Image (spheres, rainbow, N blue to C red):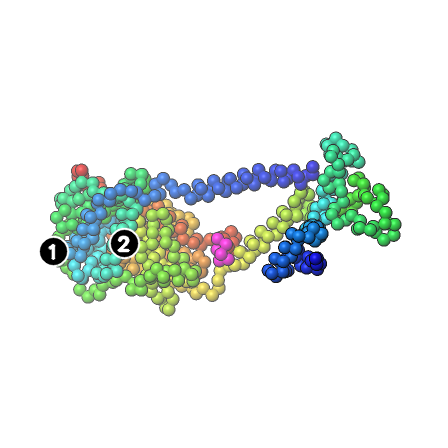
Amino acid sequence: MSAEGHSSAHSVPVTLLVVALLCALLLTAAHPHATAVPAEGRDDGMSVLRRAAAAEDEVAYSGVREVTGPEGTEGRRLNVRVVNRPGEGLAMAPVGDEDSTLVISPSSALESLDDRLLRMLRDTYDVSGAGTAVLEGRETLLVEAERADGTVAGRFWVDTATGLLLGRTVYEADGEPALSVRLTGLELEVGDWPEGESGDSPWGDTLTVGERDGLRDEGWPLPEYLDWNLRLVDARSTEYAGHRVVHAVYSDGLSQVSVFTQRGKLDTEHSPTLRNGYVGTGAGGGSVTTQHGTIFGGDAGQYQSMWQANGFVYTVLADAPAGLASSAVTALPGPGSGFWARVHRGLSRLGLL
Amino acid sequence: MDHLGERLSALIDGELGPVEHESALIHLAKCESCRFEADMMRRLKRRLHGLCEPEPDMDFMGRLTSLSRDPGGHSGHGPSDPPPGGAGFGARPPLGSSRPLGGFPGDGGALSAETVPAPDTAPTEPAARPDRRRIGSDRIAHLFPAFPAFPGGRYAVAGFAVATALLGSAFVAGGDSEEAPVVEPPLADYAVEHAVTSRYIPVVDAPPPTTAEAPPTTAEAPHGSVETTR
């Protein structure tokens, strides 16, 4: 026969091979990592954490909140004086810089957010009681949040007497503590309240499900998930100079990632480096991600990043382990400027991706 | 007894009304000549329907014919040897290319052996078609000398053209939108909003690391400074 006959005879196994490879690729990509699944369990520790959340609205106290970042991070500790007054709010100020006081007013929005965070924690991890422990001379109930593979993702220390949350630690996947918070010098009395502070509340314009869908239809990037365990738990918006800014909160129940999105582009002279003294560091001094420039690690395990992509400017602030912050950032549209990045952006705009 | 006549044709075509259709069927049951005529008309109609089917592509038939006449074949038959069981597939001229009934004008109307093309001489016209394809391939090879001529090159070139058009469209569509305003995100406000929802001190307003030096000796991570009992 002719060469065409031979080519058609060869094309059949080649086609089958390509189809098989594509199927294998899709199946591999769709199959999550063994630990990237919600942990099943009785979640018998949730009642302790709910009590701790309620105690914040019932117990007046003051003390010093010690925030500790990842090991090896310069300036990994931050001490914050906190004063809690039920009905008036929570006042926080860095020790030695009391002029920079932030007062958070109580609001139904925050209570609702607390409920959603607790549900997210329950859905993502196996939250169980792990006995009792002594912290700062006080007896506490220890609650652990475990991943599906049995490793500990977070621990909570809840004061047995008052129900207050005295300590909390979030761990990286390798078991290293990423962010630890403990309440020291606890005094169960009304502390000095910063007079003259009006207090802050979350942005008032809560985005309903329908409004979120409407924004997505208009091209706003507002994904429900940034990672398998990083789910959208709250979305709000406000306006600056007549332009909408959307604040999306993603959480796994242990950490929070805030994504601020607004239409526009950054000034060409805008340099994301050396902002507020942060010098492009992540955990251990290295950059957290390279796809979106550098995530700037602040003190005590806090991260921020800002970039532009597809006509939007993104600002990410995270109180999360470096791995989680990195996965959150990389899940959002990247600021690629090369040929293929532009082609990819164009395919997205044409609806082909 | 009156025969169906023209109504017979209407019956075959299904154009009779219910009453006439019923009476015609009753007549057919009784009349053998009408029944015979109806049977013939049905057969004729089937034949006519068969003629309306689409004819095979002349180009396709021509290529098949040229393949069957490939002298390098390994069938063991000579190019003029008829294949077993009669003429091979493609050896006959394509449908529609045979002489019409009654012959061509001027050939005397005789169905002689000379007028029926022999298997080895008939497909001169269809065999010329693949040459046109080869000419096209040669043109492609001439346009792209770096690429050797290979079967299906036309499809490769077409695919390349489609991919180029797609990439070009995506590149144009992926350009920066000039109408996007230049913005300076109010980072301090964002930090406060984040702090309110997370109940943590604002990240950007945190003091420089020097303020956090010399932490208290008790400022170890909670998990490292507690006694745990289960």
Q: Is residue A348 visible?
A: yes
Tell me what residue is drawn at x 27 percent, y 54 percent: A116
* Labels 2 and 1 touching (C-beta < 8 A): no
- Indicate the chain on which mark 2 is placed: A
Labels 2 and 1: the sequence-earlier one: 2
User: Dot 1 surroundings within 10 Å: few (below 14), some, or many (20 or more)?
Assistant: some
* Secondary structure of residue under mark 1: loop
Q: Which residue is mark 2?
A: A116
Q: Is residue A307 left or right of residue A194?
A: right
- Position of residue A345 measured from the top left corner of the image (x, y, whole percent): 48, 55
User: Residue flagged by tag 2: what amino acid is it?
Assistant: Arg
User: Dot 2 surroundings within 10 Å: few (below 14), some, or many (20 or more)?
Assistant: some
Q: Is residue A11 magenta?
A: no
Q: Is residue A337 left or right of residue A186?
A: right
Instruction: Give the residue furthest to the bottom.
Output: A242
- The range drawn in magenta is A348-353
* Secondary structure of residue under mark 2: helix
**Disc sitting over residue A189 in the figure:** 1
The number of numbered discs placed on residues in the rendered structure image is: 2
Marks 2 and 1, how far apart at CA? 30 Å
Magenta region, main secondary structure: loop
